Amino acid sequence: MKQTGLKKILAAVAIYSAAIGLAIAQQTTTTTTTDPVTGTTTTQQTTTSSVGNIVTYTPDSDYFTFRTAANAAPVRYYYTKDTTVVDPGGRIVNWSAIRPDLPATIYYSTVGDRVVVRKVVLTQPATIIKREETTTTTTTRP
């Protein structure tokens, strides 16, 4: 009975791994069509995802660099005020949670010659630094 449960778990893990592999391998799809009667050209772009590490992020800029593999060159990904950053649980976090070498999944599309990020999903939870201060006062009595 225990072996059947283990086989089901292993099969589910294998299916999930295959689905993740397909999601990582997605490419941006751009479809351009021209209406022969009116001559109107329509371009449609599909959002794509990529998994890797954030290499650099400067709060005053409009981009961050992202690397999909250890031996790959970092690429600039631009963000807008509509770009959201979420933790692994799906909760929205501040941009201050982004740190260099932080693993993440980004969802983006190509707009002109720029890659514009729509959503950043941090793979690790944002680090919360809690500081506690203790003050000891000693008084002496005469």
Image (cartoon, rainbow, N blue to C red):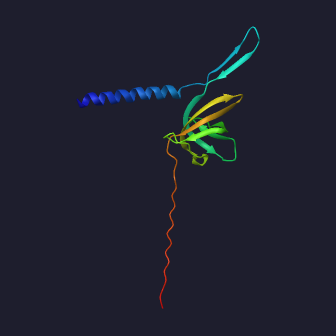
The quarter holding residue 65 reads: top right
From the top left corner, tell me how far across and down residue 121 is, in percent. 54, 38
Residue found at x 29% / y 31%: 6
**Residue 80 sits above or below residue 48 on the image:** below
Would you say 3 lies left or right of 66 here? Answer: left
Would you say 6 lies left or right of 23 here? Answer: left
The quarter holding residue 9 reads: top left
Q: Residue furthest left?
A: 1
**Residue 56 sits above or below residue 33 on the image:** below
Residue found at x 70% / y 44%: 61
From the top left corner, tell me how far across and down residue 44 is, in percent. 66, 21
**Residue 123 sits above or below residue 39 on the image:** below
Give the camera-side residue of 78 and 69.
78
Residue 69 seen: no
The count of marks equals 0
Q: Residue furthest top?
A: 37
Quarter of the figure that contains the N terminus: top left
From the top left corner, tell me how far across and down residue 124 is, in percent. 49, 43
Q: Residue furthest bottom?
A: 142
From the top left corner, tell me how far across and down residue 82 is, in percent. 65, 38
Residue 37 seen: yes
